[in-house]
Image (cartoon, rainbow, N blue to C red):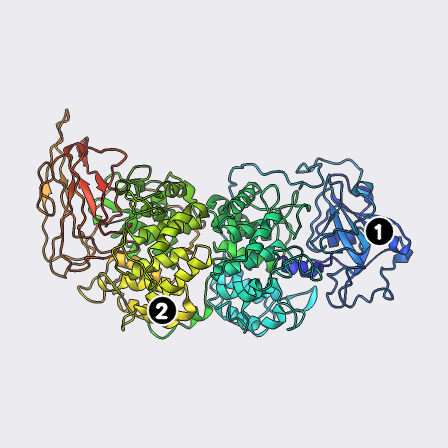
Amino acid sequence: MSLLATGAVAVAAGGTVLLGNPRAAVADAIEDCTATTGAIVAVDFGHWGGGVVRGCDADPSTGMNLLHKAGFTTAGTGHDGPAFICRLGIGSFNGGTQYPTPAEEPCTTTPQATAYWSYWIAAPGQQTWSYSQFGAATQKPKPGEVEAWVYGGTDIGGTSGAPAFTPESVRARNAGPSPSASPSASPTVSPTVSPTATASPTGPARTGDPAAAAVWLAAQLVDGDHMENWAFEGPDYPRTARTAIALAAAGSQDPALRKVLAFLRARTDAYLYPDGPAGKPDSGAAALLALVAGSTGGDPRAFGGRDLLAALTDHVCAAPGENGKCTAAGDFHGASSPWVQAWAVIALRRAGVTPPASALARFAVLQCADGGMAGSMIVAGGYCESDPGATSLAVLALRGVTGYEPMATKAAEQLAASQQADGSYAPYAGAPGDTGSTAHAAQALLAVGQGARQSAAKAWIAARQGEDGGVRPDEATTDADPAATEQAVLALTGTDLGAVRHNPDGATTPPAGRTPDPARGSAYLTDRARLIDGHYYEAFPAFADFGLSIDGAFALAATGADDTALRGIVDFLDRQGKDANERTVNDWTAIGTEYAGGGSIGKEALLAEVVGRDPRAFGGHDLIAALAAVTCAKADDNTGCAGAGNYTWATSVFSQALGIMAQLRAGDTANAAAPIAYLKSLQHADGSWPSLIPATGDSDVDSTAMAVMALALAPGDEAAAAVDKGVAWIAGRQLADGGFPGAAGDSTNSAALAVQGMTLRRSAHGVAIAKALDFLAGQQNDDGGFNVASEGQRGSDVRASTQVLGGATGISFGTLRRDLGGTPTPTPTPTATGTATATATPTTTATPTATPTVTGTSTATATATATATVTPTPTVTPTTTPPGTATPTTTGSPTASGAPVLPGTSVRPADAAPVAGGLDEPVRGGVGAPVVAVPVQVGSRVGSGGGLASTGTETLVLTGAAGLLTALGAVAVLVARRRTGSAPGRHR
């Protein structure tokens, strides 16, 4: 038996302890096992003058049950319970006496490393023994495997004390069917078949009910506040911690969650210091408690009176040893499995702490040749077999870590390739799928953008859910299991250990003051007069505002109020739906053209990640590759590059931040490095960021909030320090009424973004957040929408409403997730009209029109009319046609400055007026700002540069040459080109 007690390993590794009866079972006949079916166990009683006794389990489930089904009896220790095998016996040797006898070993505490039952395995085809670093309760024998128990001494790495007999000498000889996976003949190579590309499995259309699962899970709590395990007396702290995280993910059992948190805080020392307060902290306990704190709005630096992060960073092994607590240098002290190593890294990263370099380097040894991660803390050259749980957690831990992205990518590829046809994951080769492995994989698949595979895994899990809400651990088991249900909740809610965030106190006992009503706000946004076939028409009649449509999707994802409407927006964009002028989202981003905008591409990719779609295959394009392609190598006005690391035509901090978040969420850390460095370079000494690129010297709340959300995803202490300074600066800008200054005045847009930014450091800014939410609630109108600002003309604005609804939740765009796997896909319908409904009548309007005649063989006359609202007084409701629109003109038409534009002349709109902004649009003019007509560019570029390739409300350069007004039958297509200068505006 390994020095690691089987029960302890099972709990630490996150699995359920399923122990067989320690008394002898009816033994399976040795003939029932073959070279390819069942498993053999051999126990060496040579220490007491006996021999090697073999036994068979024709249908093995665990190493423990293999012993019992083979006819052996076991006894544990008084300290560890039956999970730690301290004695072994069998009826055929000395009448069934269990050894060592009480005179030799009292079995009250863990035996010494010089005399205990060590546990060894040899996979099918393996010619040498490998020391098992799993306990018998969690080791799952593969068909054709042999296992051995030898009494004597060895160390935690199994470098001595191996069985004196070979695996072949005890292996089953009978012929049998071929194994499901061909094992390797090499003793140093995992028998797992190297993964190859496989088609995404198609799971049944089932989504599961995480709320019902949470109800069932809460009902399993002993005394309403903790979990127990029949294998040992007292609380099961790891399971209690994982239950807390699951209840936080569900967000629907706050009374139970509060009790569990109180229990864990009161017993932090008992869990953290299993050897007493004078001993070193247990890394598994520190990691799980830190994840509990981070998931529930607590502070992992002060949970239960302990700094859990320091407990991890201050106790990293420098070398093997410490009585088995360190397998190798880089292990977190006492880490019993790669699961614990990954938990610790995830806990540190989500708290903004850079994991120790040696702890990260340890994963290089744990990674198997096929890309997966070992299930045990192996050393260099050790037997390596990929474990889906360890692989999934490693993906979550390493993605986005500089230098480790190739490792994370390789692990993710192995995970994708090992998915079974029904969507499930098997814990080992040849086994049926199980809920724990599949749920862990679903979390990792979603994090890396493998939406189809994640949905199939989630559907398989949902099929294991019973009517009572509990989830069964596998297809064969009839009863629900707490450990399976804990992991299932995270998978069903579309989240993971690094992203769960729910404060039960904040949800049930809100701070003094009002909060916006998300239900009424969502109803306002999804009203059919506004959201037309999955998109908004707010900027120009008949031209869909793709950026605003994505803003609406972000808001609906954050509130979770209307998944059907959310899916409608996402499907419209993903399927390249066309607006009333036959434009798609690709015309907006200008992807694949010389005018491709990094901010708009990033925003589209971010939406795909938020809803669980693959950003590498969204809207017909690989958006992550496109972002890498539009990253500037140097400053170049001709490509819209302000400097190295800027994205092309990303002329605002908003645009830069959107691209960075998309790349980091997709795991493309290497290509995000230069954009991150550029964003950092824009931060002022006081912690703020400017609004525009190139920087103009101003400091902007909205842009600073976006910048800190982006850098919160970036690795390293430097990024964390930049976030700290930025958030502190934002908090210092709060006005007396709780709002924040923006270009429109006391702006709802700015206040909402400030809430998101400050929530990154909620513990320090809870009062300011509450004041901001009260301010926003006061700006909500009877129709559910929100004003642009506290002063000026009242009236709901779609753009402001999208930002307020999402921002008021406090969820960063960097972590926002709303899995759409469960909502029905509406049947797409053609867009019949593109006329938006105005919600207010401006005081003065002017509608200039121009009717250019298309020349050439066609005789059709195309009329292109754009309506401009010209209002020099602060009485314009922002939902009307925005100021700054003008009709494209033909030869000789005047520009905003009065100068005529000649054919073939490019006008740089350096001072063009911006319009009211939202998520990525700084409001520079605001309500009542002077209106400046949009300069017109005349040229002959058609095709790749065509389409209204703007952000929807940023300043546009309309191309008005007759050659660009193409008559298709009797319909004229107005083509617009992105602005070529650094005019104000953000990618919407």
Q: Residue at x 32, y 50 (%)?
A: 655
Q: CA distance from mark 2 to mark 1?
A: 66 Å
At label 1, counting other C-alpha atoms closer than 10 Å, the crowd grade (few under 14, some 14-19, many 20 or more) is many
Q: Residue at x 11, y 35 (%)?
A: 852
Disc 1: which residue: 44
Q: Amino acid at mark 1?
A: Asp
Disc 2: which residue: 769
380 vs 882, nearest the viewer = 380
How many numbered discs?
Answer: 2
- First-in-chain label (2 vs 1): 1
At label 2, counting other C-alpha atoms closer than 10 Å, the crowd grade (few under 14, some 14-19, many 20 or more) is many
- Residue 818, percent across and down? 42, 54
531 vs 769, nearest the viewer = 769
Figure check: 930 above or below 858: below
The reply to whether residue 522 is visible in this rendering is no
Q: Is residue 573 left or right of residue 113?
A: left
- Residue 824, percent across and down? 41, 48
Q: Is residue 246 left or right of residue 642?
A: right
- Residue 158, percent across and down? 74, 52
Q: Amino acid at mark 2?
A: Ile
Badge 2 marks a residue whose secondary structure is: helix
Name the quadrant of the N terminus. bottom right
Tell me if label 2 and label 1 are in contact, CB under 8 Å: no
The answer to which quarter of the image holds residue 948 is top left
